[in-house]
Image: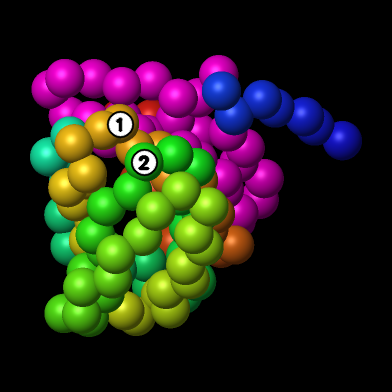
Amino acid sequence: MKQANLQEYIEYSPDNFTKRIVFKEGESTVFVLNFTANQSLPKHKHPGTNVYLLVLSGGGTFTIDGKDVKAKANDVLVADGEEEFAFVNDTGENTSLYVMLNKVPSEQYVQNI
């Protein structure tokens, strides 16, 4: 068993969003993405795995296969690995997302940035 407190992974940078790995076990990973106002995550896919997203704080707009989806704290979304998605923190406040990938498609997805 492992335990973590998510507050330890909430770290904002004025230069770019941050990604902090909470767990990596086999092909699965859990991480927190942190965004200050107007920071964004570029369009991308996660082939071979669903992406589960929980808005921990703040909010913003996800663009999933070209459709804008507003989300706020405590909203949960899931994107199929073949759906292209992006995110922008357009709320004016800090935003943190809890992300879970059940099967890591490549090592690039489990690195802190």
Question: Is residue 107 in the magenta section?
Answer: no
Q: Residue at x 67, y 45 (%)?
A: 25
Judge from the rendering whether residue 1 lies leftward or rightward of residue 23; answer left or right. Answer: right
- Picture disc at residue 58: 2
Label 1 vs 2, first from the N-terminus = 2
Q: Residue at x 21, y 73 (%)?
A: 68
Q: Residue at x 31, y 22 (%)?
A: 12
Question: Is residue 29 in the magenta section?
Answer: yes
In the image, is residue 104 above or below residue 15?
Answer: below
In the image, is residue 61 above or below residue 5?
Answer: below
SS label for mark 1 = loop
Magenta highlight range: 8-36
Q: Residue at x 51, y 62 (%)?
A: 76
Across and down, in percent, residue 82 comes to 34, 80
Q: Quadrant of residue 83?
A: bottom left
Camera sees residue 76: yes
- Looking at the picture, tell me which residue is in the foreground, 50 or 93: 93
In the image, is residue 59 above or below residue 21?
Answer: below
Judge from the rendering whether residue 62 lies leftward or rightward of residue 31; answer left or right. Answer: left
Q: CA distance from mark 1 to mark 2?
A: 6 Å
Across and down, in percent, residue 109 comes to 39, 48
Look at label 1 and name its amino acid: Asn
Instruction: Please give the residue where the numbered disc 1 appears in the rendered image.
Output: 94
Across and down, in percent, residue 105 comes to 44, 62
- Looking at the picture, tell me which residue is in the foreground, 30 or 74: 74
